[in-house]
Image (cartoon, grey):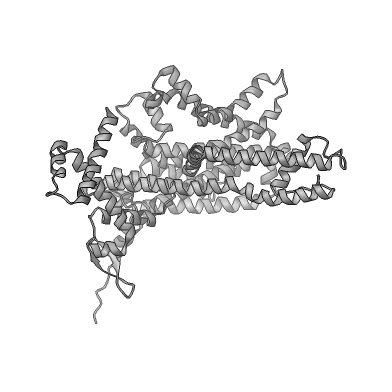
Amino acid sequence: MNLRPISFTSLNLHIRKRVFDLFFNHQIKTNYCNQFERFITYMIVLNMAGLMLEHIPVFYETREHLFHIFDVVSLAIFSIEYVLRLYVAPEDPVFSSAKYPRLAYFKSPFALIDLVSILPFYLGAFIDTDLRVLRALRLLRLFKLFRALAPAVNEFLEKNKDKSFRYKIYALVNETPTSGNLHHIFDMFIVTWVIVSVLAVIFESVHSISYHLHSEFIILDTIAVLIFSTEYLMRIYSAPEDPKYQALFKGRLSFSCKPTSIIDFLAIVPFYLESLLHHLFDLRFLRVFRLMRLLKLARYSGATQSLFTVIKREWPVMKAAVFILLLLVMLAACLGYVFEHEAQPDKFENIPQAIYWSVITLASVGYGDISPITPAGRAITIVIALLGIGIFAIPAAILSSALGDQLRIEREAMMNELYHMLEDGVISPDEQEMIEAEAKRLHLSKTELDRLLEKAKVQMGLEQASVKDAKGDKGATSEMSLEFLSKHPELAAEQLKITISKLQQIVSVSDRQELNKYVNNPDNVTGLQSSMLKLLLQNATAKEQKKD
């Protein structure tokens, strides 16, 4: 058997195209392009953090070898990235049309930034240079972030070229159809600073760390406050772009009273109060309130928003559960005071003091600092402890079941959106982007999203449903026949909903009087059909009257 020899040139072309498609081709969504760029971005940020920590003796002096190893690994990674980008330049549409694609890439701004960030360290091997200078030159790696930032900025400016300055600010700080990737980068920037500032507050409370890094903590907190203040002012300034806050003054005032806006305000106000009033009052206790910045992360979590929706929806039931809990706490405190006051006047001095014992007993914690010693007191403690197991579980059970129900409702709403998008038979790129964003908010994996899309297409009759044969293998496909629906009751229910929706649409565009005449004639319809049609007509009429 003669094998056809593969030339080195064809092999090189195949490898080059494969590498480009895997790591650098933005047109392919299933490759590793986004992961590769995210990894490089994380490495740049870690390098900046390492450079800052090197100026702190308590961190650097005892771990100098670890910093050196990290620097060598980072240099190797950035060098490999530069070589790979240079190697695949002929495959990049930006440079492929040039006479010398690699030379064109070599002269491009991003390639020069990549080269400058690694070249000084290689030159240091041949030129006698102060190592401190080489470490400082690592700041040039910060410019590599422009590779991810510049395309996002260009995309944002292109999408908002006809918009006002205020709308551009609104699109930057809020999710809009024209926000693009720049909004996600902005969100990630704010989230990063929230985490950094909260960690700084925590470490500042450790005396051994605060002693060495006191000035660094002050600088870090000042920068964080400036960033959060700018974000707060941007949100207040652009609030009238939201239809709910269109009035220039009242709209901004209403926006500033939102829970998320109050959290943003509380995240920065301790710094200003302490700075302006420190000579009048000792406001150092306000520093702990900087931990309120952690609540800012609630804006960026879809699960947290769902939890707030659940609490708002179930609040009447929660109030009833809390009322029962408070009633039991007060009853237990009164009984504890009655039975234990004479035996332990120092611990059960009054009812408010007995409330503490009642709460920790109901919570099944029982710290042991207050314990009944009389037989009646111990008996009531046993009863209260047993009741507390169930009483404290009621709010938790309400929230957990309601949260699961809320997620189910939101996923059903997403399915309805899929039905609406599939009315024309196809999903456009913009619709696909919206679906992926909603799936991310609902914490759906790609497999689950594909399954929902397939299910929606089957139910809309756009595709055939895969069925398993008797052996359990995926085999033949069949239309959504009555036999198929009889084996899949959940699909039958969804198909029935779609059918009823279509009937409602037909009734809404039909002549009601003619339909009534037709329905009232027993020769035209059966009793069941007549009842169903009359119900649809009544529903359509009620909707129109409601609109009027």
Q: Which residue ends up furthest to the front in the rendered image?
A: 522
Image quadrant where one finds the C terminus? top left
- Place residue 474 in its image quadrant: bottom left
211 is higher (above) or lower (below) than 389: above
Q: Nearer the viewer, residue 146 or 338?
A: 338
Q: Nearer the viewer, residue 47 or 537?
A: 537
Find residue 123 and report its horizontal and vertical position in percent.
51, 47
Q: Which residue ends up furthest to the bottom in the rendered image?
A: 1
Q: Residue at x 72, y 45 (%)?
A: 360
Q: Residue at x 41, y 46 (%)?
A: 409
Q: Is residue 543 left or right of residue 285?
A: left
92 is higher (above) or lower (below) than 195: below
Res 9 seen here: no
Q: Is residue 441 left or right of residue 177?
A: right
Image quadrant where one finds the N terminus? bottom left
- Place residue 459 in its image quadrant: bottom left
Find residue 147 and report its horizontal and vertical position in percent.
41, 42
Q: Residue at x 24, y 50 (%)?
A: 499
Q: Residue at x 54, y 28 (%)?
A: 262
110 is higher (above) or lower (below) than 459: above
Q: Nearer the viewer, residue 539 or 121?
A: 539
- Place residue 430 in its image quadrant: top left
Find residue 110 and report its horizontal and vertical position in percent.
39, 42
Count of numbered circles in the view: 0
Res 24 seen here: yes
Q: Nearer the viewer, residue 440 or 372?
A: 372
Q: Is residue 297 left or right of residue 9?
A: right
Find residue 419 and report its horizontal and vertical position in percent.
28, 48
